[in-house]
Image (spheres, rainbow, N blue to C red):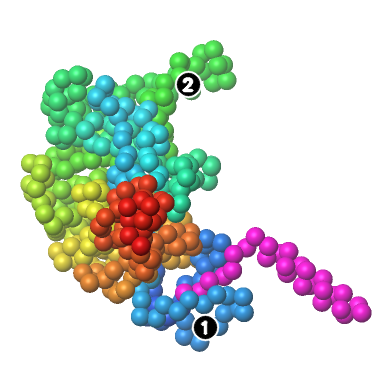
Amino acid sequence: MKKYFCSLFILLAFVFSTQGQEMRTAYVGAKIIPIVGNPINNGFLLIQNGKIIDVGDATNKSFTADTKIVDVKGKVIMPGLVDSHSHIGEVAGADGSAPIQPEIRTLDSINPRASSIQRAQAGGITTANIMPGSGHLDSGQTLYIKLRDDANTIEDLLIFDKDKKYMGGIKFANGTNSLRGSGGFPGTRAKSVALVREQFIKAQEYREKIRKAGNDRSKLPPRDLGMETLVEVLEGKRVIHFHTHRHDDIMTVLRLKKEFGFRVVLQHVSEAWKVADEIAAAKVPASIILIDSPGGKLETTDIKWENAAALEKSGALVGFHTDDYITDSRLFLRSAGFGVRAGMSREKALYGMTMANAIMLDMQDKIGSLEKAKDADFIVLSGDPLSVYTKVEQTFVEGNKVFDRANPKDHLIAVGGYGATNDRLIHIDCFDSDFGGHK
């Protein structure tokens, strides 16, 4: 009897200890590209409760009886892609009232049910930096989101730091975009920088007033949302994502960084190949875009596919972005292929799609590679990630499948067609005949 009660106690303890826990799932047999570490030809990825439990060689590997086994032989698994510059979610930022508006929050202008978010899932993107436009010197705060499924509100997509604050940066720009010469906007590059410099000096003075006030609230300056945001920038709590193209504009950003000590990620940098050594020496990361149909702005005339290779050779941290719709999120993987085609190493090209961008978003401890304790964000590919014939078959965010090419609805998003961009139909049923779809 004593033995019986002992066994019963152990069983009940096990039941209660596992309540609320998801079953362990092992994806077995695929070639795994962990990004950090060498590829594993016959690998396994073990996940539970949205986290990676283990990753390694599946040869002679055994799993506990309560583990669900998913056979993915012949496939390739790699981390979910991280897009360090995107405009999905119908995002908007500052208006035409002023050239510098740091108080603007893109959090307040993103549609979490937009079909563009599902397009990104179809492209294997699991995390994105959602940016306002670049028609201002500062168009507002950016937002880092996880592309979770079935989002009801934007709060369902937020990512929080260790202080329980939702994560994001701030968007700045120089070059031709903000040159209007009226309505308070600059007419020259020199005036553009002068306006930015003035705002950072004001932010320094605002911060000093707060310091001097100490605990005496009566001495605090009037609250200023814009200044509060720029103080976060000065203190390194918020990264500047700086839109810039020409080599002289890039050098201007590096001078401002040195003067005010802020952290910055260079965005686009079409002429980075001209000043790659200077970028590397400043220890500034570059988020670049590689396009197969150059055109548009005159300041991008000298963009080269060799941009990525030049930055890698110089020792700079380089990642890729879509600037969606400039590059459709569904085609993001080809950016790595373009980089390799023009001389970038395979390893750094894939790193630039994942881990490099995670570092730029201060999320290297959460995402970007397949390592123990990281979020279970990963994609299942039909073949080599650099092949033009390869398709994203499945996308997982925190262990949850958010895209499956075998699902007719998801296939519609991946390839386009009737109903693919209709937000309402997608979230109801694109194939419900009551809404004009197809059975």
Quadrant location, the N terminus? bottom right
The answer to whether 61 is drawn above or below residue 284 in the figure is below
- Nearest the camera: 304 or 203? 304
Rendered location of residue 135, percent (x, y):
21, 33
Residue 21 belongs to magenta span: yes
Residue 120, by quadrant, is: bottom left
Gap between marks 2 and 1 measured at Cα = 59 Å
- Nearest the camera: 181 or 406? 406
> Chief secondary structure of the magenta span?
helix
Does residue 259 show up? no
Residue in view at x 14 percent, y 34 percent: 176
Judging from the image, what secondary structure is the residue with disc 2 in?
helix
Q: Which residue range is magenta in the image? A: 1-27
Q: Earlier in the sequence, mark 2 or mark 1?
A: 1
Task: Categorize mark 1 by other alpha carbons within 10 Å: few (<14), some (14-19), many (20+).
Answer: few
Residue in view at x 16 percent, y 20 percent: 182
The residue under label 2 is: 210
Q: Left or right: 183 with respect to 147?
A: left
Task: Categorize mark 2 by other alpha carbons within 10 Å: few (<14), some (14-19), many (20+).
Answer: some
The residue under label 1 is: 61
For the residues carrying marks 2 and 1, which lies nearer the camera in this image?
1
Q: Residue furthest bottom?
A: 60
The answer to whether 259 is drawn above or below residue 185 in the figure is below
Q: Amino acid at mark 2?
A: Ile
The answer to whether 374 is drawn above or below residue 59 in the figure is above
Does residue 170 show up? yes
Judging from the image, what secondary structure is the residue with disc 1 in?
loop
Q: Residue furthest front?
A: 434
Q: Are marks 2 and 1 in contact (CB under 8 Å)?
A: no
